[in-house]
Amino acid sequence: MANLNGFNAHEVEPTTAFEPLPAGKYVAAITGSEMKATKRGDGSYLQLEFTVLDGDCKGRKVWDRLCINHPNDLTQKIARGSLSAICRAVGVMQPRDSVELHNLPLLITVKVKKRDDNGELTNEIKGYAKKDAADGRQPQAPVTDNTPPWKR
């Protein structure tokens, strides 16, 4: 039994079921992270919580799991590549702790997919980029030669 300290549902608006975020690109930030053991106990994954920072979905959450310590080399390679993309997107190249990646805006690409276990739709993060990519601008590399811009 749990003590609810006089909770009164009349005083609190009920939550409604959330549909998955529509597929697209969102400016978001990591707002939570935790290292967890895999089901089999043979590795660990970094669970990341992202919060959308603007637009119609502002405040909504989406999660990703990066199996950065896993017995399958390909799984581990993919996860470490995603972590590298996150680090580059937020400008923290050698984090000692995942909290160093928190609250830094980046652009996430979200897809909608059907879950294998129950057929429900869910979100999956498929890419990470610098926030600058959100407005269509690509970061400009410094010019290192004298070639006119129209010939580059």
Image: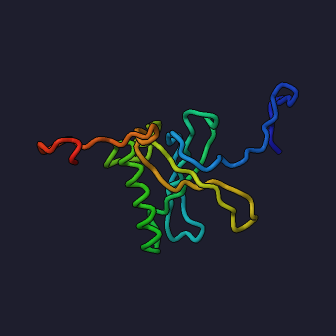
Residue at the extreme front of the image, as rendered: 150
Q: On the rendered structure, is 103 left or right of 60?
A: left
Q: Nearer the viewer, residue 69 or 73?
A: 73
Residue 37: x and y in percent read 54, 62
Question: Horizontal and vertical percent for residue 135?
Answer: 45, 37
Direction from residue 3 to residue 43 in the image, left or right: left
Q: Find residue 104 and report its image quarter.
A: top left
Q: Hey, which residue is sitting farthest bottom in the picture?
A: 72
Q: Is residue 140 above or below residue 81?
A: above
Q: Is residue 21 left or right of residue 17?
A: left
Q: Which residue is rendered at x = 59% and y = 56% of the image?
A: 124
Give the residue displayed 47% in from the left and 69% down from the top.
75
Task: Name the spot of residue 45 as percent of width and height, x first.
Answer: 51, 60
Q: Residue at x 88, y 27 (%)?
A: 10
Q: Is residue 81 above or below residue 41?
A: above
- Front residue of 76/43: it is 76
Viewer-nearest residue: 147 or 76: 147
In the rendered image, residue 46, in percent from the top left (x then y), is placed at 50, 55
* Residue 123 drawn above or below residue 8: below
Query: Observer-nearest residue: 58 or 6?
Result: 58
- In the image: residue 120, left or right of residue 112: right
- In the orientation shown, which residue stands out farthest toward the top? 11
Q: Quadrant of residue 61?
A: top right
The quarter of the rendered structure image containing the N terminus is top right
Q: How many marks?
A: 0
Dividing the picture into quadrants, the one containing residue 81 is bottom left
Residue at image coords 63%, 53%: 123
Name the image colouring. Answer: rainbow
